[in-house]
Amino acid sequence: MTYSFLRLAAEALRGQTGWTPAWRDPEPKAEYDALVVGGGGHGLATAYYLAREHGITNVAVLEKGWIGSGNAGRNTTIIRSNYLLPGNEAFYEHSMKLWEGLEQDLNYNAMVSQRGVLNLVNSDAARDAAARRGNAMRLHGVDAELLDADGVRAMVPYLDFDNARFPIKGGLLQRRGGTARHDAVVWGFARAADRRGVDIVQNCEVTGIRVSNGRVMGVETTRGFIGAGKVGLAVAGNSSRLAGMAGMRLPIESHVLQAFVSEAIKPLIDCVITFGAGHFYISQSDKGGLVFGGDIDGYNSYAQRGGLPLVEDVMEAFMALLPLAGRLRVLRSWGGIMDMSMDGSPIIDRSPIEGLYLNTGWCYGGFKATPASGWCFAWTMAKDEAHPLNAAMRLDRFASGALIDEKGAGPYPNKH
Amino acid sequence: MSPFLGGFTAPLSQPCRLRTGGLVDRGAPLAFSFDGRSYAGYAGDSLAAALLANGVRLVGRSFKYHRPRGLLAAGSEEPNALVELRDGARREPNTPATIVELYGGLQASSQNRFPSLSFDVMAAGNVLSPLLSAGFYYKTFMWPAAFWEKVYEPLIRRAAGLGRASGLDDPDHYERAHLFCDVLVIGGGAAGLAAALAAGRRGARVVLCDEDWRLGGRLLAEAARVDGLPGPDWAAAAAAELAALPEVRVLRRTAVFGVYDCGTYGALERVADHRPEPGPHEPRQRYWRIVARRAVLAAGATERPLVFAGNDRPGVMLAGAVRAYLNRFAVAPWRRAVVATSGDEGWRTVADCARAGIPVAAVVDRRRDVPVPLARLAAQTGARLFAGGQIAAARGAAVLGAVRVIDAAGAPHLVRADLLAMAGGWNPALALTTHLGGKPQWDGAASAFIPSDLPPGMAVAGAARAHYALPAALADGANAGAEAAAACGFDGAAPPMPQAEPGDGAASPLWACPKARGKAFVDFQNDVTTSDIAVAHREGFRSIEHLKRYTTLGMATDQGRTANVNGIAVMAALTGQGVERTGTTRLRPPYVPVAIGALAGHHRGRDYRPTRLTPAHDWAIEQGAVFNEAGAWLRASHFARPSDADWLQAASREALAVRQAVGVCDVSTLGKIELVGPDAGGFLDRLYINTFSTLPVGRARYGVMLREDGLVFDDGTVARLEADRFVITTTTANAGPVLSHMEFCHQVLWPELDVHFVSVSDRWAQFSVAGPRAREVLQATLEAGADLSNQAFPFMAVGTFPVLGGVAARLFRISFSGELAYEIAVPADHGDAAIRVIMRAGAPFGILPYGLEALSILRIEKGHPAGGELNGQTTARDLGLERMMSRRKDFIGRVLAQRPALLAADRPMLVGFRPVDAARRLRSGAHFLPLGAAATVANDQGWMSSVAYSPILRHWIGLGFLAGGTARIGERVRAADPLRGEDIEVEVMAACQYDPEGARLRV
Amino acid sequence: MRIPCPHCGERGHEEFAYYGAADPRRPDADAPLEAWHDYVYLRDNPAGPHRELWQHVHGCRRWLEVTRDTRSHAIAAARDVAARGTA
């Protein structure tokens, strides 16, 4: 069913009774050409691009719960392509371009909203780093603007400019950055993949990976064995567990990241703002809630919940940046489990096992990557080699030293 | 100050206040305003009760359709009556009127309406409502693509949202506090009071939190008796006893909002919200972090609305809320009631209405067999009994006018009424049992989700576990309190249990009302109707989590407290799966919305983070220092003089003074770690890439540390004070991380090494005295007799000399500036005196204080790496320090520094730069491109990391990383800075552009 | 979380700094690059009991080996690294 004005009008007249399921609920087949494990944004996008770009439609996405139940549904919805390092920037810019045409491509309104992403800088050193990064973006043909303090004040006058512990000295602005409605991204990719024949199998947990003579044969699941010559893992938060089923150890730790939303208020914040001195980021949703977050709690966790110290830390940064927030209220918090990689950048690569592919290490930045991650992972699975866009996101870069460490934080996942 | 406080004289009438009864203070009338109109209420009222006392029944507009709404509830679960409180900088949006404690002068207004509550043009959206079903937004607004941000989204955003933020800085302050206790009791109703008494009487440290301003919970709203006393009186007696127990602390107006790991709870105390503004030095709210060995959750239950067409009309209320307004607040704005009940519960409302003189037109009891005493009560009150009846729809204009009832035989009746009290059963308030991942279980007998899988140390008592009857709740609480105390070692004799008359406590089943024309609301605040759920079901959003996200069910400020279970039931009916298998969504903290200011506490403005000041800070202020934030420190950027046009001129003046005469710089912020022990030298050998065990006593050496991954971690100097005593410096930023790293290496990797070390960063004030006249200045600073001659105290010498009449100062002949220089360290207490002595001693030589900017100029002239170069992404080789790496020993990072990509020939390496046109300015962050090449990433060869204007060279200079590094010295490249629209030609230089032989150091 | 420091008693985890897995041991100086890669980069990352290092930075500054379940955050044990011997 294609969504259109006409369809909406027709359904309004007949009491919304004609809608059909956005995706089927199929029984898994015994064998597929390719399996994608993980029904989050990345997994569903992978399946969609396998079908659309490579004509591989005999594909199933296996999801242990309901699609979008992992980090796709637990993030702060920010999209941007403001990276420093060549191994990252071209990839994220590709993602941004896919976001820009996503709704028409998927026939689904994921509410991609290019409201601008403003990274505040609070010191001369931070400004120098922002300039280096902004210039790197420009050399990639990506939009970037360096604002001085007055430029920031003109754009977001309600920040604390006059009594701040760390004065706002300027900012790096990417106007094409913004937000997207996270759940709708999941549903849009699911529906579009389904329309191209992909089976989306929910409540199907992978319990084992069958490998024979160094080749993947398929996966054991709670709904039986499912065979496939190609298996892609896109299971952020659980990558180590799944890879462990195939006997691999990864350069990954699972960490919890909390995020928060306030009660809905009338429009206040128009763009995405990040606060360099306090690891804090905020935007306002179309519904009116302020969506914000900060650092990871900093210890290994699979519990999808964090602790009060981090809550306090985030709220302190909020108040430091926006002293008008004192009387606004946090409505909900949630925790997602991040694949924290050892250099803070992702891995989209083949694995040492033939036919088994890895999509992992997104740290807390996976949402914005969703379309490009799916696009590149589909390419890598279909052609058994990396696309130039993900060529640097190799598993063996830790052995070779070709690290992609944007922050220079070193091999400490909780510092990225 | 509000005009009401001073100008108030006679009480305004309260037309809907009952003549007697209630827990309000009729001797304390209070004036307040709502939407600009003045009213009066009494002390003890909630804003909601006071509005009802004045006959105000339209209190809000709904989120999506802007439908008129009245009060549904009497407690914090209220979904409709959200108001903006106060004005100006204290304006606060979205507070339920039911939890607002009335005070004189209170100002409230309705929100999300334009221009007024009774005439809201946004309600015109109602005509579009057939279009606006669940998922509508996802299916449209895609054409044309550019219209989303420009046209559709701004409209949606303007229409959405609830109240308005003040837009001004919050003038109030907030406090954070910690509490430790044996037993935390959450909820001060019958079960909670019994639990607190049982634990407190045994001597346990008890904290009782209750969100209300008056203890008692439902006892305040019901006509029940405990120990022969009316419920409120018993609660007051219990409160008095608790207040007298020394180990018990009662926190009223305090909501426990979250359960965290290891017995930690978050709670919010509304300290001053019941007054116009906080008193002097009083926080508005206090956020408690409570650590409890045991907890008793006695949070009660929330009544379920019925889901039928028009159920959102003002006048349709929860039956328990009606009793609260009648009994606790003595208000009754209703003339004729209908009571709908699925069990015995609603009949209490029948009785209470009758007692208050409100005619009950009809009782609709879902059961065909209504117990005889209840049927008799109907007869006594003159209510028409519809046994086995159903509610089909609510009718009316602004408020309820009539209820459409279907009798047991299926015949419709229209019953005139302006109040419909719904008793659809109760949902235990179990949110706090789920924060650590516990999943509630559906209990068919109780017709409710009940807690299961409790957080460690938590017990649940009373209505929160579906034990609704008062005697059961009291017994439950007393048992849970006693057990919790016993678990903490307080197991004294059991005191008497409070007794209550047996009342009804039977569970009421879920009630599916028949379908009828019109919207039947499940989530009132978010305007989610049964047909929205049907659409979600039709489109495959059947998982309860998908339902929530697709329809926004349960995502409003009330967190779906009245909506979730009904929504689950509607979906369960559609799927045929049953409520049990449908399950609940995961509930997450906070249970009640919490002010961001409260969680932040005092950490705002300049107090966001601590500020560290050096011992010479006051002196620096006197010298006109302009400070920069360097991590936690404030450091002098430069010392402004009236003659300076700008900071650049000041910094140039200071740097020139160092090159030509002498300057002094406060370097106290450097990390300083002192090591002692026979293995201290060997330990340093393992930490640094170069060797220190061979360093002679009385000498210092520059050192570089790597991380274990082979990239540069930090640099500094190591000085050997005695054979087994060293002191090292770290960069300011890494003072803490280096210490932790050393402790890791010693405690975890090499505990066998006999070495001890401690941070002495704060123990020493340290000053760099640099310039050709530095020796003379030091000579005059130190006590007479110090031999500072080049022979006696050469470059890199270290020694101890007396200053200030006998204070032992450490003197290091080290130089960051490239000039003859010393760093002198004195105990921190003497830092201020020492800098003044240095300045006096230096006056004849023209000494000037210099700040970070001049320091930066000097080190860039010398090509020394600093923050811009030591950024965690560079290797020793990148920095040109490869030869420092010892091949004769193991050290942290040695092996992984040899990975092939880190040794690649095209890795950008540190070099210097100068503009070909000496008049041009350089910029940090510019990227290097070959001459004539396009500005694309393919041609990117590196970046500029640090720049300065060199007053001695009279042009800008830079340090940067360039592919090919030193092999390209003399070549010209472009420094492209498209961000600032600059693209200039630069010459590649050696990193050190001034005195490359170091002749000036060793004089 | 509350960590029972063997020296200072039970304290909120914000007093401690987290390092990561406690089991990887630094290779001998002559071990091959691969051993160093595994030591620095590869992690078991279990969903369940996890031996990990924390430093009591705002207390005794000792490094502790804490055994904690990464699913429940329940802490089974905490001891000074000196107590774990050289095994």
Image: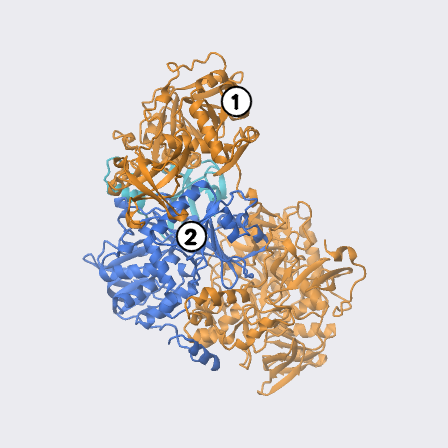
Chain colours: A blue, B orange, C cyan
Percent x, y of residue A320: 54, 47
Percent x, y of residue B902: 27, 41
Left or right of residue B398, residue B844 in this image: left
Q: Which residue is mark 2?
A: A256
Left or right of residue A311, residue A80 in this image: left
Q: Are marks 2 and 1 in contact (CB under 8 Å)?
A: no
Q: Which mark is residue B52?
A: none
Q: Nearer the viewer, residue B287 or B132?
A: B132
Q: Which residue is mark 1?
A: B839
Q: Quadrant of residue A59?
A: bottom left
The residue depicted at 33 percent of the width and 62 percent of the height is A43
Label 2 Cα crowd, 10 Å radius (few <14 / some 14-19 / many 20+): many
Amino acid at the residue labelled 1 = Met
Q: Secondary structure at mark 1?
A: helix
Q: What's the chain of the residue with tag 2?
A: A
**How many numbered discs?**
2
Q: From what the image shows, is residue B469 above or below residue B989?
A: below
Q: Nearer the viewer, residue B581 or B618?
A: B618
